[in-house]
Image (spheres, rainbow, N blue to C red):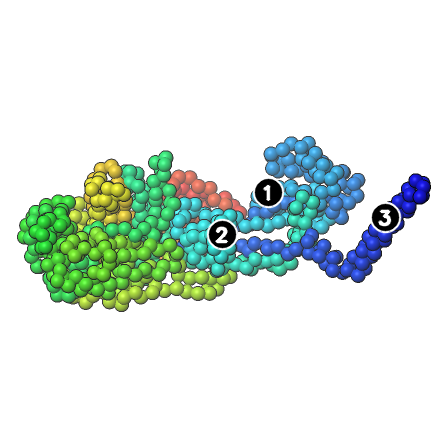
Amino acid sequence: MSIRTNILIRVYLAFGLILVFAGAVMVQLCRVQFVQGKKWRAMSVSLSTQYMNVEAARGNIFANDGSMLATSVPEYELHMDMLAGGIADEKIFYEKVDSLAATMAQYFGDRSPREYSRMLRDARKDSDRYALIRRKVSFQQLKDIRKFPIFNMGKYKGGLIVLQQNKRILPFRSLAQRTIGYKNDNATNAAGKSVAVGLEGAYADYINGENGKRLMQRMAGGTWMPVNNGDDEISPKDGADIISTIDVNFQDVAQAALKAQLDKSQADHGCVVLMEVATGEIRAIANYQRTKNGDYQETMNYAISESAEPGSTFKLASYMSLIDQGKIDTSSLINAENGRYDLINPRNGKIALKIKDAEDPGTIISAKRAFEESSNVAAAKFVYAHYHDNPQEFIDKLYSYHLNEKNELQIPGEGRPRIKNTHSADWNKVQSLSQMAYGYELKLTPLQMLTFYNSVANNGEMISPLFVKEIRRLGNTVERFQARVINPKVCSDETLAKVRGMLEGVVQEGTGKLVIKNNLYSVAGKTGTAQIAVRDKGYGDKNHHQDSFCGYFPADKPKYSMIVVIHDPTVGSHLAAWVAGPVFRAIADRVYSSDLEMNQSTPIHFVSNTQLPKAKAGNRKAVQEVFSKLNIKPMYASNNAAGNGVDTSSGLAFEEVKYDKGTVPTVTGMGLSDALYVLGNAGYRVAVHGSGAVVKQSVTGGSIIPKGSKITIELQ
């Protein structure tokens, strides 16, 4: 075969293969286009468009009085479709783009008109259908922006694309910040949900609402834009509102008092909780941790999470057990050993435990006096003497108070209490019982300890603390909460009366008398100074303490209970009365002075029938309310009573200001606000000179002058 023939065969063969391959490609194209076309078109749509979540506005969190603690405000991200219908014609776009740029520059003030114009023109050249215009735009700004040139052409013609986002804000900023909590969208839990703590986390199912759906289309660069110009396909359902038990005024007082004392004592951290006795509602809860720069911030909710040895505040449980089981009475005597006692191990005769008191309580004292002076020696000797043969009896009594159980709070993160028993691996037959008597070798959170003290104030009924009392949606109550009863009666009424007397004695005659005692109202409670175990050193380092005071007020008719815990103060005294006591006193004083429903006995003041207490004229109902709160009562008839009649109006003239229509009212004797209100309602303009009460008006009351006339009033 010739070379020419061989080459031709190879060329024909290669050409034939190319034709076969081209034919196969054409067949496959036809198959994809006509046979499988429906399938691939559907897949293409699914890859370029999809429904995405539209975040629902989260519900609000309110304080007890209706003040807003947390809310969601809309925040918008603005984009622009440069090929929208109204500006598809280049002539229209370029006629108005400079006006839009100038308006944006004037409104936002961050770029010049030329820079904005260049940005918009470049986006137009690129045929950008989703050009970013602005992030973090408020609702009011959005209303203004819709009136800008081009954007005012309408929803679809102007090309403005609005994406709504929700921003969580705290109107009171740091007030109860840790209790309110937060939601972290950048972190997820095991279930794949955003991490949330505090009330935000506990009631997330209510607060979060239900997300909506919006059809989005993938653009160049992986950007997604709404297909229908920002309209929601499925509207989101906003979250429900949470009505908390927090009182903003008490919360503010609690935080300020705690932080001031932490600064003064240079402590590591501290917390305070104020609870309403009868309802268990938490009115204030504050937690502060010392930062590296020496400031204090709320980083952890110590009040509900930190389980620690409470120290002498636990003596209430020890003495309650002893008295309720008939082991001792408040008058039972004990040798306090001048505050120094060595517990001897009966097996080897060696010292098993050295027990010390902060101050010398003396020798032979009563149980009541030992409690008031917070004697560790007395508490240890009482408990050891009556329970060492059967220590489990003491443990079982503590368990009957449910001190070994969580309170099942509405907020997650509650620390686990620990009351060891004789079966515990670390039970020491010689010293554990004595140590537990004054608050060691066991652990409770501050709120768990407060719950126990609150039961004493609440006539023996132990209830779980309450942080949320109601859930509302669109103003309607969805669910209402009441405190769970943990123990209907922690002890007998006789025991209750005795321990309440002991708690009052601590403040009146004991460790709290110099700091916490107040002559205006009575306080009952107990100080607690606990030595802190330091890593690698145990209790050997005597410079680390936890100081606390737990109690309630007014002692004769308790309305509020409170605990203050300050951890590791480094400046000044380490005694609880001088560290935790000032915080308790400062908060209690403010609460008592502002709560008019408390049992405050105001002396009755008598006035003659010739001179009433001085009050400005005006709204007499308001005056009557103030006088009734002050319990002011006249001795004889008042001004508006008959000459020889009996007083029928508590000495106050209740008539409101009356005047004939079309005449000038008499405002002499009124305060400024009342005078302005009356004259303004009558249709006159008012000029004011001076301050105080009205002593003169330029137009006499009862005169007839045209409405709109000017009347000058002088105040003194």
Front residue of 439 and 320? 439
Q: Earlier in the sequence, mark 1 or mark 2?
A: 1
Q: Is residue 571 above or below residue 485?
A: above
Residue occupied by mark 3: 18
Left or right of 152? Residue 707 is left
Q: Earlier in the sequence, mark 2 or mark 3?
A: 3
Residue in view at x 25 percent, y 51 percent = 309
Instruction: Identify the element where label 1 is drawn.
Output: strand
- Kind of residue at badge 1: Arg
Residue in view at x 92 percent, y 40 percent = 3
Quarter of the image where the C terminus is located: top left
- Kind of residue at badge 2: Thr
2 vs 3, front mark: 3
Residue occupied by mark 1: 135
Residue 401 location, x and y as percent?
A: 24, 63
- Kind of residue at badge 3: Ile
Q: Measure how far apart labels 3 and 1 are at the Cα level.
A: 56 Å
Q: Quadrant of residue 443?
A: bottom left
Q: Quadrant of residue 243?
A: bottom left
Residue 344 location, x and y as percent?
A: 9, 51
Rendered image: mark on residue 188: 2
Instruction: Identify the element where label 2 is drawn.
Output: strand
Quarter of the image where the N terminus is located: top right
Q: Residues within 10 Å of mark 1 (few under 14, many from 20)?
A: few
Q: Measure how far apart labels 1 and 2 are at the Cα level.
A: 25 Å
Left or right of 642? Residue 30 is right
Residue 496 location, x and y as percent?
A: 19, 63
Q: Is residue 119 above or below residue 21?
A: above
